[in-house]
Amino acid sequence: MTRILSVHSFRGGTGKSNLSANLAAAFAAKGLRVGVFDTDLASPGIHVLFGFTAGPDSHTLNDHLQGSIPIEKCSHDVTPASLAGGKGRIYLVPAAMDGDRIARLLREGYEVERLNDALFSLGQSQHLDLLIVDTHPGINEETLLSTAISDCLVMVMRPDQQDYLGTAVAIEVAQRLMVPEARLVVNKLPAHFDAEQVRARVAQSYGIPVGAILPLSDDLLTIASGSLALVDVPSHPWSAGVTQLAADLADALL
Amino acid sequence: MRSSDPPDAAGASAAAVPLALPDGPLSMGRLVALEPAALRQLLTMGLRAGLAEPDLDACCAAAAPSLGQAPEQLRARLQERGWLRWDPERQRWRTRLGTDRPPAPPQA
Ligand SMILES: Nc1ncnc2c1ncn2[C@@H]1O[C@H](COP(=O)(O)OP(=O)(O)O)[C@@H](O)[C@H]1O
Ligand SMILES: [Mg+2]
Protein backbone atom coordinates (compact mmCIF):
# COMPACT_ATOMS: atom_id res chain seq x y z
CA MET A 1 0.00 0.00 0.00
CA THR A 2 1.27 3.49 -0.91
CA ARG A 3 2.49 5.51 2.07
CA ILE A 4 1.39 9.12 2.29
CA LEU A 5 3.75 11.82 3.49
CA SER A 6 2.30 15.29 3.96
CA VAL A 7 4.67 18.24 4.07
CA HIS A 8 2.99 21.05 5.91
CA SER A 9 3.65 24.29 7.75
CA PHE A 10 1.50 26.73 9.63
CA ARG A 11 2.89 29.74 7.80
CA GLY A 12 4.03 30.22 4.22
CA GLY A 13 7.56 30.39 2.84
CA THR A 14 9.04 27.86 5.25
CA GLY A 15 10.45 25.73 2.42
CA LYS A 16 7.73 23.07 2.03
CA SER A 17 7.94 22.93 -1.76
CA ASN A 18 11.73 22.84 -1.82
CA LEU A 19 11.72 20.12 0.82
CA SER A 20 8.96 18.09 -0.87
CA ALA A 21 10.64 18.12 -4.27
CA ASN A 22 14.07 17.28 -2.89
CA LEU A 23 12.68 14.51 -0.68
CA ALA A 24 11.06 13.06 -3.80
CA ALA A 25 14.46 13.11 -5.51
CA ALA A 26 16.10 11.44 -2.50
CA PHE A 27 13.47 8.67 -2.49
CA ALA A 28 13.75 8.18 -6.24
CA ALA A 29 17.53 7.91 -5.86
CA LYS A 30 16.84 4.98 -3.51
CA GLY A 31 14.91 3.30 -6.32
CA LEU A 32 11.44 4.19 -5.01
CA ARG A 33 8.41 5.16 -7.06
CA VAL A 34 7.19 8.49 -5.76
CA GLY A 35 4.19 10.65 -6.51
CA VAL A 36 4.12 14.38 -5.71
CA PHE A 37 0.82 16.25 -5.41
CA ASP A 38 0.76 20.03 -5.49
CA THR A 39 -2.25 20.70 -3.27
CA ASP A 40 -1.27 24.34 -2.80
CA LEU A 41 -3.94 25.24 -5.33
CA ALA A 42 -4.04 28.92 -4.39
CA SER A 43 -0.29 29.44 -4.81
CA PRO A 44 1.16 26.45 -6.68
CA GLY A 45 4.84 26.21 -7.47
CA ILE A 46 6.54 22.86 -6.90
CA HIS A 47 6.51 22.07 -10.65
CA VAL A 48 9.17 24.78 -11.11
CA LEU A 49 11.64 22.78 -9.05
CA PHE A 50 11.21 19.84 -11.42
CA GLY A 51 11.56 22.09 -14.47
CA PHE A 52 8.02 21.14 -15.50
CA THR A 53 5.99 23.53 -17.63
CA ALA A 54 2.40 22.64 -18.34
CA GLY A 55 1.73 22.66 -22.08
CA PRO A 56 -1.69 23.52 -23.51
CA ASP A 57 -2.67 19.83 -23.40
CA SER A 58 -1.11 18.83 -20.12
CA HIS A 59 -3.64 18.27 -17.39
CA THR A 60 -3.36 19.45 -13.83
CA LEU A 61 -4.92 18.51 -10.51
CA ASN A 62 -7.54 21.23 -11.14
CA ASP A 63 -8.76 19.31 -14.21
CA HIS A 64 -9.42 16.32 -12.01
CA LEU A 65 -10.90 18.14 -9.02
CA GLN A 66 -13.14 20.42 -11.06
CA GLY A 67 -13.60 18.23 -14.10
CA SER A 68 -13.69 14.65 -15.23
CA ILE A 69 -10.07 14.05 -16.25
CA PRO A 70 -8.77 10.85 -14.61
CA ILE A 71 -5.98 11.57 -12.12
CA GLU A 72 -3.59 9.34 -14.09
CA LYS A 73 -3.78 11.80 -17.00
CA CYS A 74 -2.86 14.65 -14.63
CA SER A 75 0.37 13.00 -13.51
CA HIS A 76 3.63 13.64 -15.35
CA ASP A 77 6.94 11.81 -15.15
CA VAL A 78 9.46 14.40 -13.95
CA THR A 79 12.26 12.03 -12.94
CA PRO A 80 15.53 14.00 -13.25
CA ALA A 81 17.77 12.77 -16.09
CA SER A 82 20.52 11.84 -13.63
CA LEU A 83 18.15 9.36 -11.92
CA ALA A 84 16.36 8.04 -14.99
CA GLY A 85 18.79 5.11 -15.33
CA GLY A 86 17.63 3.66 -12.01
CA LYS A 87 14.34 2.14 -10.90
CA GLY A 88 13.15 5.23 -9.09
CA ARG A 89 10.51 7.45 -10.66
CA ILE A 90 8.85 10.75 -9.76
CA TYR A 91 5.32 11.47 -10.95
CA LEU A 92 4.17 15.02 -10.45
CA VAL A 93 0.54 16.08 -10.25
CA PRO A 94 0.89 19.84 -10.72
CA ALA A 95 -1.72 22.49 -9.99
CA ALA A 96 -2.97 24.88 -12.65
CA MET A 97 -0.89 28.03 -13.00
CA ASP A 98 -3.15 30.37 -14.91
CA GLY A 99 -4.99 33.02 -12.96
CA ASP A 100 -8.41 32.15 -14.33
CA ARG A 101 -8.17 28.53 -13.24
CA ILE A 102 -6.92 29.44 -9.79
CA ALA A 103 -9.70 31.99 -9.38
CA ARG A 104 -12.29 29.47 -10.54
CA LEU A 105 -11.09 26.91 -8.06
CA LEU A 106 -11.20 29.38 -5.21
CA ARG A 107 -14.62 30.61 -6.29
CA GLU A 108 -16.33 27.29 -6.89
CA GLY A 109 -14.35 25.06 -4.58
CA TYR A 110 -14.31 21.29 -4.93
CA GLU A 111 -15.10 18.27 -2.83
CA VAL A 112 -12.06 17.43 -0.71
CA GLU A 113 -13.28 13.87 -0.99
CA ARG A 114 -12.12 13.88 -4.62
CA LEU A 115 -8.62 14.76 -3.51
CA ASN A 116 -8.63 11.82 -1.11
CA ASP A 117 -9.80 9.41 -3.82
CA ALA A 118 -7.26 10.82 -6.28
CA LEU A 119 -4.35 10.16 -3.92
CA PHE A 120 -5.37 6.56 -3.32
CA SER A 121 -6.17 5.97 -6.96
CA LEU A 122 -2.84 7.26 -8.32
CA GLY A 123 -0.94 5.38 -5.64
CA GLN A 124 -2.55 2.17 -6.74
CA SER A 125 -2.48 2.60 -10.52
CA GLN A 126 1.16 3.77 -10.65
CA HIS A 127 2.29 1.30 -7.97
CA LEU A 128 3.77 4.11 -5.93
CA ASP A 129 5.77 3.41 -2.81
CA LEU A 130 5.23 6.92 -1.51
CA LEU A 131 3.09 9.93 -2.17
CA ILE A 132 4.33 13.33 -1.07
CA VAL A 133 1.63 15.94 -0.56
CA ASP A 134 2.93 19.50 -0.79
CA THR A 135 0.36 21.65 1.00
CA HIS A 136 -0.97 25.14 1.35
CA PRO A 137 0.14 26.66 4.67
CA GLY A 138 -2.24 26.90 7.59
CA ILE A 139 -5.28 24.95 8.63
CA ASN A 140 -8.19 24.48 6.25
CA GLU A 141 -10.32 21.61 4.92
CA GLU A 142 -7.63 20.40 2.50
CA THR A 143 -4.75 20.51 4.93
CA LEU A 144 -6.86 18.80 7.60
CA LEU A 145 -7.62 16.07 5.10
CA SER A 146 -4.01 15.61 4.00
CA THR A 147 -3.00 15.52 7.65
CA ALA A 148 -5.67 12.96 8.53
CA ILE A 149 -4.76 10.57 5.74
CA SER A 150 -1.00 10.81 6.05
CA ASP A 151 1.14 8.02 7.39
CA CYS A 152 3.64 10.68 8.33
CA LEU A 153 3.33 14.42 8.73
CA VAL A 154 6.45 16.51 8.15
CA MET A 155 6.00 19.92 9.78
CA VAL A 156 8.35 22.56 8.45
CA MET A 157 9.16 25.67 10.46
CA ARG A 158 11.69 28.46 10.58
CA PRO A 159 13.37 29.49 13.81
CA ASP A 160 10.82 32.29 14.22
CA GLN A 161 8.45 33.07 17.08
CA GLN A 162 5.36 33.09 14.85
CA ASP A 163 6.36 29.73 13.42
CA TYR A 164 6.96 28.32 16.91
CA LEU A 165 3.42 29.16 18.02
CA GLY A 166 1.69 28.16 14.80
CA THR A 167 3.52 24.85 14.61
CA ALA A 168 2.23 23.96 18.07
CA VAL A 169 -1.33 24.51 16.86
CA ALA A 170 -0.82 22.36 13.75
CA ILE A 171 0.76 19.57 15.79
CA GLU A 172 -2.13 19.57 18.24
CA VAL A 173 -4.52 19.17 15.32
CA ALA A 174 -2.41 16.32 13.91
CA GLN A 175 -2.57 14.60 17.26
CA ARG A 176 -6.36 14.90 17.31
CA LEU A 177 -6.35 13.27 13.88
CA MET A 178 -4.15 10.47 15.19
CA VAL A 179 -1.39 10.78 12.61
CA PRO A 180 0.80 7.72 13.18
CA GLU A 181 4.18 9.41 12.58
CA ALA A 182 5.37 13.01 12.57
CA ARG A 183 8.70 14.76 12.07
CA LEU A 184 9.62 18.34 12.70
CA VAL A 185 11.95 20.05 10.24
CA VAL A 186 13.54 23.37 11.09
CA ASN A 187 14.58 25.09 7.87
CA LYS A 188 16.48 28.32 7.19
CA LEU A 189 18.54 28.15 10.34
CA PRO A 190 20.92 31.15 10.31
CA ALA A 191 24.61 30.21 10.49
CA HIS A 192 25.12 31.84 13.89
CA PHE A 193 22.42 29.67 15.56
CA ASP A 194 23.52 26.59 17.44
CA ALA A 195 21.79 23.72 15.59
CA GLU A 196 22.02 21.31 18.54
CA GLN A 197 20.48 23.83 20.90
CA VAL A 198 17.61 24.44 18.49
CA ARG A 199 17.13 20.70 18.04
CA ALA A 200 16.93 20.16 21.78
CA ARG A 201 14.54 23.07 22.24
CA VAL A 202 12.05 22.07 19.56
CA ALA A 203 12.21 18.38 20.48
CA GLN A 204 11.30 19.31 24.03
CA SER A 205 8.60 21.85 23.12
CA TYR A 206 6.67 19.70 20.67
CA GLY A 207 7.33 16.16 21.81
CA ILE A 208 7.71 14.84 18.27
CA PRO A 209 10.98 13.69 16.69
CA VAL A 210 13.11 16.28 14.93
CA GLY A 211 13.68 15.04 11.39
CA ALA A 212 16.23 17.63 10.29
CA ILE A 213 17.71 21.01 11.07
CA LEU A 214 18.49 22.61 7.71
CA PRO A 215 20.64 25.70 7.27
CA LEU A 216 19.65 28.99 5.73
CA SER A 217 21.67 28.83 2.57
CA ASP A 218 22.83 31.40 0.04
CA ASP A 219 23.19 28.55 -2.44
CA LEU A 220 19.51 27.68 -2.10
CA LEU A 221 18.63 31.31 -2.60
CA THR A 222 20.79 31.27 -5.73
CA ILE A 223 19.14 28.10 -7.02
CA ALA A 224 15.93 30.06 -6.35
CA SER A 225 13.65 27.01 -6.73
CA GLY A 226 14.93 26.67 -10.31
CA SER A 227 16.11 23.09 -9.83
CA LEU A 228 16.74 20.39 -7.24
CA ALA A 229 19.57 21.05 -4.79
CA LEU A 230 19.89 17.31 -4.27
CA VAL A 231 20.72 16.86 -7.94
CA ASP A 232 22.81 20.02 -8.42
CA VAL A 233 24.76 20.11 -5.18
CA PRO A 234 24.25 16.73 -3.48
CA SER A 235 27.01 17.23 -0.92
CA HIS A 236 25.79 20.64 0.24
CA PRO A 237 24.83 20.52 3.95
CA TRP A 238 21.18 21.31 3.08
CA SER A 239 21.07 18.45 0.54
CA ALA A 240 22.86 16.12 2.92
CA GLY A 241 20.28 16.93 5.63
CA VAL A 242 17.40 16.16 3.26
CA THR A 243 19.04 12.91 2.13
CA GLN A 244 19.40 11.81 5.73
CA LEU A 245 15.79 12.75 6.47
CA ALA A 246 14.65 10.69 3.48
CA ALA A 247 16.59 7.69 4.79
CA ASP A 248 14.99 8.10 8.21
CA LEU A 249 11.50 8.41 6.71
CA ALA A 250 12.00 5.41 4.43
CA ASP A 251 13.05 3.36 7.46
CA ALA A 252 10.02 4.47 9.44
CA LEU A 253 7.45 4.07 6.67
CA LEU A 254 8.49 1.34 4.26
CA MET B 1 -14.23 13.25 38.07
CA ARG B 2 -13.20 13.16 41.70
CA SER B 3 -10.40 10.77 42.51
CA SER B 4 -12.58 9.19 45.19
CA ASP B 5 -15.23 8.19 42.63
CA PRO B 6 -15.22 4.47 41.95
CA PRO B 7 -14.54 3.78 38.28
CA ASP B 8 -18.03 2.40 37.56
CA ALA B 9 -19.66 5.56 38.94
CA ALA B 10 -17.57 7.61 36.53
CA GLY B 11 -18.73 5.36 33.70
CA ALA B 12 -22.36 5.82 34.72
CA SER B 13 -22.08 9.61 34.84
CA ALA B 14 -20.48 9.65 31.39
CA ALA B 15 -23.44 7.66 30.10
CA ALA B 16 -25.89 9.98 31.88
CA VAL B 17 -24.63 13.05 30.00
CA PRO B 18 -23.95 11.62 26.56
CA LEU B 19 -21.99 13.59 23.99
CA ALA B 20 -24.16 14.64 21.08
CA LEU B 21 -23.51 13.49 17.55
CA PRO B 22 -23.90 16.62 15.38
CA ASP B 23 -26.36 16.67 12.49
CA GLY B 24 -25.57 17.44 8.90
CA PRO B 25 -22.77 16.44 6.54
CA LEU B 26 -19.27 15.73 7.75
CA SER B 27 -16.45 18.18 7.07
CA MET B 28 -12.83 17.96 8.17
CA GLY B 29 -13.39 20.96 10.43
CA ARG B 30 -16.17 19.06 12.12
CA LEU B 31 -14.25 15.80 12.29
CA VAL B 32 -11.27 17.33 14.05
CA ALA B 33 -13.56 18.69 16.80
CA LEU B 34 -15.54 15.46 17.36
CA GLU B 35 -15.60 13.66 20.68
CA PRO B 36 -15.05 11.02 21.87
CA ALA B 37 -11.59 10.25 20.50
CA ALA B 38 -12.77 6.76 19.52
CA LEU B 39 -15.30 8.31 17.11
CA ARG B 40 -12.60 10.51 15.58
CA GLN B 41 -10.45 7.43 15.24
CA LEU B 42 -13.24 5.52 13.52
CA LEU B 43 -13.81 8.28 10.97
CA THR B 44 -10.10 8.87 10.42
CA MET B 45 -9.56 5.18 9.71
CA GLY B 46 -12.51 5.39 7.33
CA LEU B 47 -10.79 8.22 5.46
CA ARG B 48 -7.60 6.24 5.03
CA ALA B 49 -7.78 2.66 3.90
CA GLY B 50 -11.34 2.22 5.17
CA LEU B 51 -12.67 -0.18 7.79
CA ALA B 52 -13.34 -3.88 7.43
CA GLU B 53 -16.48 -5.18 9.18
CA PRO B 54 -14.68 -6.27 12.40
CA ASP B 55 -12.81 -2.91 12.60
CA LEU B 56 -16.08 -1.04 12.37
CA ASP B 57 -17.66 -3.19 15.06
CA ALA B 58 -14.70 -2.65 17.37
CA CYS B 59 -14.65 1.13 16.76
CA CYS B 60 -18.41 1.45 17.32
CA ALA B 61 -18.15 -0.56 20.52
CA ALA B 62 -15.41 1.78 21.76
CA ALA B 63 -17.16 5.03 20.79
CA ALA B 64 -20.81 4.24 21.55
CA PRO B 65 -20.86 4.35 25.40
CA SER B 66 -19.81 8.02 25.67
CA LEU B 67 -22.47 8.88 23.09
CA GLY B 68 -25.11 7.14 25.20
CA GLN B 69 -25.91 4.72 22.40
CA ALA B 70 -25.69 1.06 21.65
CA PRO B 71 -22.94 0.23 19.14
CA GLU B 72 -25.49 -0.85 16.47
CA GLN B 73 -27.37 2.40 17.01
CA LEU B 74 -24.20 4.46 16.47
CA ARG B 75 -23.42 2.49 13.35
CA ALA B 76 -26.90 3.17 11.98
CA ARG B 77 -26.68 6.89 12.86
CA LEU B 78 -23.37 7.29 11.03
CA GLN B 79 -24.88 5.75 7.92
CA GLU B 80 -28.07 7.81 8.15
CA ARG B 81 -26.03 11.00 8.31
CA GLY B 82 -24.09 9.89 5.26
CA TRP B 83 -20.80 9.94 7.19
CA LEU B 84 -20.06 6.30 6.54
CA ARG B 85 -20.84 4.19 3.50
CA TRP B 86 -19.90 0.80 2.14
CA ASP B 87 -17.43 0.89 -0.73
CA PRO B 88 -18.10 -2.24 -2.80
CA GLU B 89 -14.90 -1.77 -4.82
CA ARG B 90 -12.60 -1.71 -1.81
CA GLN B 91 -14.86 -3.92 0.30
CA ARG B 92 -14.48 -1.47 3.16
CA TRP B 93 -16.53 1.01 5.13
CA ARG B 94 -15.38 4.48 4.17
CA THR B 95 -15.86 7.92 5.64
CA ARG B 96 -17.81 10.25 3.41
CA LEU B 97 -17.15 13.99 3.51
CA GLY B 98 -19.40 16.69 2.14
CA THR B 99 -23.02 16.93 1.19
CA ASP B 100 -23.25 14.01 -1.18
CA ARG B 101 -25.65 11.71 0.68
CA PRO B 102 -27.61 8.67 -0.31
CA PRO B 103 -31.00 9.81 -1.66
CA ALA B 104 -33.55 10.39 1.07
CA PRO B 105 -36.42 7.93 1.18
CA PRO B 106 -39.59 9.35 -0.42
CA GLN B 107 -41.85 11.21 2.03
CA ALA B 108 -44.99 9.29 2.90
N1 LIG C 1 17.23 26.63 3.57
C1 LIG C 1 16.97 27.65 2.77
N2 LIG C 1 17.83 28.67 2.64
C2 LIG C 1 17.57 29.72 1.84
N3 LIG C 1 16.45 29.85 1.13
C3 LIG C 1 15.54 28.87 1.19
C4 LIG C 1 15.74 27.72 2.02
N4 LIG C 1 14.65 26.93 1.90
C5 LIG C 1 13.82 27.54 1.05
N5 LIG C 1 14.35 28.71 0.63
C6 LIG C 1 13.72 29.72 -0.25
O1 LIG C 1 12.54 30.17 0.41
C7 LIG C 1 11.52 30.46 -0.53
C8 LIG C 1 10.26 29.68 -0.16
O2 LIG C 1 10.49 28.30 -0.35
P1 LIG C 1 9.31 27.30 -0.73
O3 LIG C 1 9.92 25.94 -0.81
O4 LIG C 1 8.59 27.78 -1.92
O5 LIG C 1 8.40 27.44 0.58
P2 LIG C 1 6.84 27.11 0.79
O6 LIG C 1 6.49 26.04 -0.19
O7 LIG C 1 6.78 26.65 2.20
O8 LIG C 1 6.10 28.38 0.57
C9 LIG C 1 12.08 30.11 -1.90
O9 LIG C 1 12.56 31.29 -2.47
C10 LIG C 1 13.24 29.18 -1.59
O10 LIG C 1 14.24 29.25 -2.55
MG1 LIG D 1 4.95 25.83 -1.56
Image (spheres, helix red, strand yellow):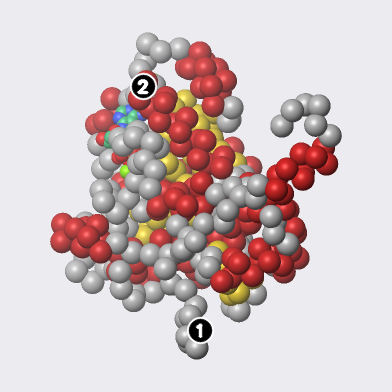
Q: Nearer the viewer, residue A55 or A30?
A: A55
Q: Nearer the viewer, residue A92 or A44?
A: A44
- Are tags 2 and 1 found on a single chain? no
> Looking at the rendering, which quadrant does residue A63 occupy?
bottom left
Q: Nearer the viewer, residue A71 or B68?
A: B68
Measured in 3D between alpha carbons, the distance from the residue under mark 2 to the one under mark 1, in whole angstroms, is 55 Å
Considering the image in quadrants, where does the N terminus of chain A appear? bottom right
Q: Nearer the viewer, residue A37 or A58?
A: A37
The three-letter code of the residue at mark 1 reads: Pro
Pointer 1 local density, CA inside 10 Å: few below 14, some 14–19, many at least 20:
few
Residue A238 position in % (x across, y down): 41, 29
Residue B87 position in % (x across, y down): 58, 75
Residue of label 2: A160
The three-letter code of the residue at mark 2 reads: Asp
Classify A199 as above or below B18.
above
> In front: mark 2 or mark 1?
1
